[in-house]
Image (spheres, helix red, strand yellow):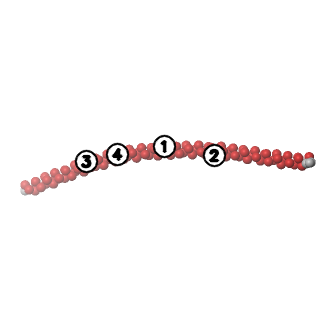
């Protein structure tokens, strides 16, 4: 049978172990809270990046439409310029032939 002194010693060790477990549990709660906050912030950051990418996509589509319009306009101008140069060359030949 254990003596009173041995029981007191065992009780003190047990109380110290319980206090240590409480400290570990408190630290675990803090870490869990921090990781929860980190996950929330990461989700917000990903959502912000998604919005930026979506806006960039819209801008790129708009720029593509503008470029297509400008390319069509350049083609029209090129065709008109070629026709005008042909007319100028014809008129110059007529002038040269008259002389």
Q: Secondary structure at mark 4?
A: helix
**Residue depicted at x 47% and y 46%:** 53
Closer to the camera in the image, 58 or 3: 3
- Pick whichever of labels 3 and 2 is earlier in the sequence: 2
Residue 91 is labelled as: none
In the picture provided, is 73 more to the left or to the right than 51? left
Q: Dot 2, crowdedness within 10 Å: few (<14), some or many (≥20)? A: few
Distance from the alpha carbon under mark 3 to that under mark 2: 61 Å
Residue 28 at what x, y percent from top left? 69, 46
- Callout in the foreground (2, 4): 2
Residue under pointer 4: 66
Distance from the alpha carbon under mark 2 to that under mark 4: 46 Å
- Pick whichever of labels 4 and 1 is earlier in the sequence: 1
Residue 80 at what x, y percent from top left? 22, 49
Residue under pointer 3: 76
Distance from the alpha carbon under mark 1 to that under mark 2: 24 Å
Distance from the alpha carbon under mark 1 to that under mark 3: 38 Å
Closer to the camera in the image, 62 or 17: 17
Question: Do labels 2 and 4 touch, CB within 8 Å?
Answer: no
Would residue 21 be seen by someone viewing this image from the given angle? yes
Closer to the camera in the image, 80 or 13: 13
Q: Secondary structure at mark 2?
A: helix
Residue under pointer 2: 35
Q: Secondary structure at mark 1?
A: helix
In the picture provided, is 32 more to the left or to the right than 96? right
Q: Secondary structure at mark 3?
A: helix
């Amino acid at each position: 049978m254990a003596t009173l002194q041995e029981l007191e010693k065992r009780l003190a060790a047990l109380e110290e172990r319980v206090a240590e477990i409480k400290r570990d549990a408190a630290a675990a709660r803090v870490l869990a809270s921090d990781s929860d906050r980190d996950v929330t912030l990461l989700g917000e950051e990903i959502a912000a990046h998604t919005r930026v990418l979506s806006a960039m996509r819209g801008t790129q589509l708009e720029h593509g439409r503008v470029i297509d319009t400008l390319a069509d306009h350049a083609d029209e101008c090129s065709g008109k310029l070629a026709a005008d140069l042909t007319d100028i060359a014809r008129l110059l030949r007529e002038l040269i032939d008259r002389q």
